[in-house]
Amino acid sequence: MVSFVSTEMVGTITIMMMMIFSLAYAISSSLSTDEGKALGSTGWWNNSASHYCTWEASLKSPYSIQTKNWIPLSLANLTKLEYLILSNNRLNGSIPPEFGKMKNLILLYLSYNNLTGGISSSLGNLTNLTYLMKHLISLRLGYNHLNGAIPSSLGNLTNLTYLSLHRNNISSFILLEIGKMKSLISLGLSYNHFNGVIPSSIGNLTHLTSLTLQSNQISGFIPTEIGNLVKLSTLDIIHNLLSRKIPLQLVNLEEIQYFNLSYNNLSGTVPHSILYNYISISIDLSHNPFEDQSRAPRQPLDYNIRH
């Protein structure tokens, strides 16, 4: 049996291995640094081998921390911190707005917790956020219970390349400011309560390879500007309220491998050019009220995507 490992997962594993290899140095020297003292004040310091997660400060010396059930505000005093990974820690409470002071952060992972409340507008101050191995910028807040709207200040993260908000309770429009984040490679907003339309500014994200908007309440039509996303390999807008015709411009997606617009209210006829060009990819246009249902293909959807 062949198992597939994504590039993203490889990068994350590599980062974690780098942190582990330098852990011995951290235990012997970190408490003498300003960062170590600040971390000690949070009550999270634990110099044993048992820990939930690791993070790395500006001097590349990681600390082992054992989490409480909330994120202490004093953690924001680590103003030289570059890498903060708190995923899979069963954390409760909200994301402290004080995180906006940690302007040296280049990686922030808070996914797979029980965080609630809104996304603080102060996160828009973290303009250095980057994902180490490929100089990607990465903000992962998926798999929590975050609600409210996405703050427009996130549009300030113009170097952001990876944004994951999957599986939260976010209910708002998709930001018009999303078009300012022109470095985005992956945008994941699936399994939320996004409503309104897909903004035409999304056509500015010409480096995007993955766009997943599955299981929201997005309405209106598919903007023709999506045809500008010529590097897109995954387009998943299943289970929404999209209507009108599929724009002919989508035939420009020459790199597409997974194309799913099923379970919407799309109408008219399926463009012949889409049927012809996408015959060899995973495509699903079923469960839409097209005029000719025989032209709403459903090819095997065997493309591995993690929401």
Image (cartoon, grey):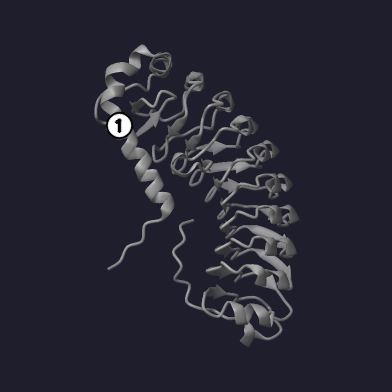
Q: Nearer the viewer, residue 92 or 47?
A: 47
Could you tell whether 149 is left or right of 22 in the image?
right
Q: Is residue 306 above or below residue 101?
A: below
Could you tell whether 307 is left or right of 40 in the image?
right
Question: Residue 272 placed where, x, y %?
Answer: 67, 83
Which residue is located at x 64 percent, y 77 percent?
Answer: 274
Label 1 environment density (alpha carbons within 10 Å; few <14, some 14–19, many ≥20) = some
Which residue is under mark 1?
A: 51
Question: Residue 290 placed where, x, y %?
Answer: 69, 80
Which residue is located at x 66 percent, y 69 percent?
Answer: 252
Q: In this view, does 263 lie above or below 155?
A: below
Quarter of the image where one finds residue 102: top right
Question: Residue 248 placed where, x, y %?
Answer: 72, 73
Q: Is residue 27 above or below residue 112?
A: above
Quarter of the image where one finds residue 209: bottom right
Amino acid type at mark 1: His
